[in-house]
Image (cartoon, coloured by chain):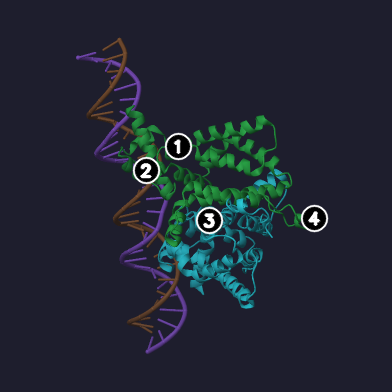
Chain colours: A green, B cyan, C purple, D brown
Amino acid sequence: MSQSDTVDRILDAAEQLFAERGFSETSLRQITSKAKVNLAAVNYHFGSKNALIQAVFARFINPFTRILRDRLQGVVAESRKVELEELLQIVTSSVIDIPARNSKSLSIFMRLLGLAYTQSQGHLRKYLEQQYSTEFRLFMRLLKDATPELNAVERFWRIQFMLGATAFTMSSSEALGSILEKELGVKTPVIGIVNQLVPFLAAGINAPSDESRHTSTEAASAG
Amino acid sequence: MSQSDTVDRILDAAEQLFAERGFSETSLRQITSKAKVNLAAVNYHFGSKNALIQAVFARFINPFTRILRDRLQGVVAESRKVELEELLQIVTSSVIDIPARNSKSLSIFMRLLGLAYTQSQGHLRKYLEQQYSTEFRLFMRLLKDATPELNAVERFWRIQFMLGATAFTMSSSEALGSILEKELGVKTPVIGIVNQLVPFLAAGINAPSDESRHTSTEAASAG
DNA sequence: GTATGTTTCAAACACTTGTTTGGAGCGGTA
DNA sequence: TACCGCTCCAAACAAGTGTTTGAAACATAC
């Protein structure tokens, strides 16, 4: 118990500092002093800084992927066509339903996910890919079924655009939120951002491509 | 001339390394050794590493903003309504029309822009904001006119989604492009990515919001 | 009690970081 | 020739990095 106490304190401090400054900008001394543990504790319990980064991710990605996998397999079991918006809703609701450790959990999760993509960090990308390839492939399969009118190249790029909009927004959601609040006096909770994101992404992915606009004019709607 | 030779060599090496690994992950020793100049040259000519980062940006953002400002003011002078897609086309064409120093200029430009947003780097964000606030405001005004059906909050977030999709995709366009080539055997030049991006963004920004879907059913199309 | 395995801790390690220093080399001016 | 401003360069600087060490403290078992 005293071990897991130290371990958890390190993980708590690390995930918070990583979310604030990024990985390479956060030193082990900053982490251990925030966690009020000895410097050597990180290497003792985790082995290395990189392993700590991965452990921080594993702690909240594991619950997420469990939820996501269950729900995706759920709709697969129903063997009916899954619309794009429903698919996106499944992903976002899975994020939202992650058991929260505290009030900031959600935004920290989002921010770290964004950093994972942008700051990468080779070792982390590899770790995430091989760790969660099953869920990723399943999602991709459903996404392909939900967008039959896209050819493979278009779909590839639009997925990247989607990931980009999500990762980027979430990686700076806190900063952006405070800008918005200062500018317009409105506060948007993380869930609110997500709810704005889904229709944007759905419309973008279903957008008519340059060629299809010549052949069809009515397929512009998302529904 | 011998001065600007050293200065340019540093800028060339720096922008390339920054684009490859990011700012804090690139050391001055890596830069100066690639540029084949003395380590102290950076601090002598630029003052500090942060100043070097800003100089790298200034070198290609200045031409870009000149082009963009001219074209935006051009459509303003015509005093007609500017559609969203035209506005996006102006921005992307301005990027493409930046005088290129070499074949990689465009992707390096994109990648650095992406890093500027995601790795930020406070000092750089401040620098860019105060340096190019005029063009940014002008673009925002036109964007507002082009999307009268959006309320301020929606518009704010959709702009972030747009920036995110762009910055993220472009910041890893090279890596993504090689993945696509390996997977599907298709090569997408940077211009091709941009052309895919515009309809995606336009559709996303013009997407029906959650509330408008209750009150209206025909406004779903992007046109 | 002693022995055992685990966890903590201060200190040091080897290394990299951005920046500064003081002298050298250069071209031009008086 | 002497002086000047500019540029270069090897070397050092102070501070920070992740990691390792070896002894201390602790808990648990015998």
Write down the residue under mark 3. B157
How many angstroms separate mark 4 from mark 2 (CA)?
A: 58 Å
The picture places residue A86, in percent across and down from the top left corner, at 62, 41
- Label 4: which secondary element: helix
- Marker disc for residue A51: 1
Mark closest to the chain's N terminus, 1 or 2:
2
Can see residue A119? no
Question: Nearer the observer, disc 4 or disc 2?
Answer: 4
Tell me whether marks 3 and 2 sit on the same chain.
Answer: no
Residue type indicated by callout 2: Leu
The reply to whether label 4 and label 2 mark residues of one chain is: yes
Q: Nearer the viewer, mark 3 or mark 2?
A: 3
Viewed as shown, does residue A27 lie left or right of A141? Answer: left
Q: Quadrant of residue A134?
A: top right
Tell me the chain of label 4.
A
Q: Chain of mark 3?
A: B
CB under 8 Å between callouts 1 and 3? Answer: no
Q: Secondary structure at mark 3?
A: helix
Q: Residues within 10 Å of mark 4 (few under 14, many from 20)?
A: few
Amino acid type at mark 4: Thr
Please give the chain letter of the residue carrying mark 1: A
Q: Position of residue B111 (x, y in %)?
A: 56, 57
Q: Could you tell me which residue is drawn at 64 percent across and 54 percent down? A: B216
- Marks 4/3: CA distance? 32 Å
Q: CA distance from mark 1 to mark 4?
A: 52 Å
In the figure, D9 relative to A62: above or below? below
